[in-house]
Image (cartoon, rainbow, N blue to C red):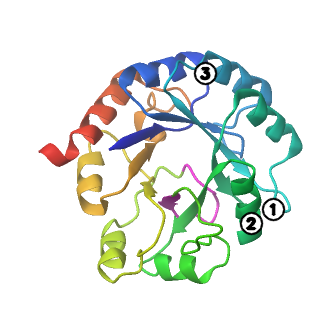
Amino acid sequence: MRVKICGITSTEDATAAAQAGADAIGLNLVGGRRQLELSQAREILASLPPMLTAVVLVRLENGRVPDEILELLGEFWVSHLQLYGQVSAESLDILLQDGFRPMPVVAVKDASFAQQARRSVAHGLGSITHRPAAVVLDTFDAAKEGGTGKVFRWEWVTAARQAGELTDWPPTILAGGLNPDNVVEAIRAVQPYAVDVSSGVEVANVAGKKDADKMRAFVHNAKHAMER
């Protein structure tokens, strides 16, 4: 089981996430209380230890990554992008051709999330030509694009898989309200490729400040979930 710790806002927390055993960290350039300035993202990227994957959260503008963010990505050879906004088949094609690993976010609102996503040209989920590297399943919130800290009903994913609605989908990354206490149950229910946590491993009431003990507990529980 792979683990991404998202909403990293400091070099200290990036180092602590790596020491906790995380496989990836997320740097938010989209919005909200954990959004980074480009200078902050640059400082964190420059500090990362080997073998830790950086995932940059970005909102596409007119189907493209903004130029100033592209410059940052090129400087640090960042290929994994968690995508928000209007993600089209064409935009996925361009990103894939440019060597990126696009991971669009699917907001899970109800049991029909898989049908709605598949009908949308936006994600090209079953396409060979513009197939994303992964899909991030996050809780729908009309007021937020992500980082809700809320759990959706995991049985919706199980039902969609049993109905064949996830056939030919890229790997799924489960997000939305995860924490050290519920990640084992979540993994067993959803059987994702990876799990993604942000607020669930933070110091209480301090957005963006990670708790090293919570990160270690989350990573340990996630990676041993299927052994219990």
- The image shows residue 53, relative to residue 19, as above or below, that is below
Amino acid type for the residue under numbered disc 2: Gln
The 10 Å Cα crowd at callout 2, few under 14, some 14 to 19, many 20 or more, is some
**Up-down: is 175 above or below 71?**
below
Q: Earlier in the sequence, mark 2 or mark 3?
A: 3
Does 73 sit above or below residue 21?
below
Which corner quadrant of the image does residue 20 belong to? top left
Name the residue rendered at 77%, 28% in the picture: 75
Disc 1 target residue: 63
**How far apart are labels 1 and 3 at the CA level?**
29 Å
Give the labeled residue for mark 2.
86
Which residue is under mark 3?
A: 10
Comparing marks 2 and 1, which lies closer to the viewer? Answer: 1
Q: Quadrant of residue 172?
A: bottom left
Residue 69 in view: yes
Q: Residue at x 54, y 75 (%)?
A: 126
What amino acid does circle 1 point to? Gly
**Would residue 50 be found to the left or right of residue 162 on screen?**
right
Q: CA distance from mark 2 to mark 1?
A: 6 Å
Helix, strand or loop at disc 1?
A: loop
Q: Residues at badges 2 and 3 in contact (C-beta under 8 Å)?
A: no
The answer to whether residue 182 is visible is: no
Q: Determine the residue positioned at 29% across, 41% down.
A: 222
- Give, as a single range, the part of the protein colored magenta: 135-147
Question: Which mark's residue is nearer the viewer, 1 or 3?
Answer: 1
Magenta span: helix, strand or loop, mainly? loop
Residue at the left extreme, as displayed: 228
Secondary structure, mark 2, is: loop
Task: Kindly check if marks 2 and 1 are in contact, taking CB atoms under 8 A apart as contact.
Answer: yes
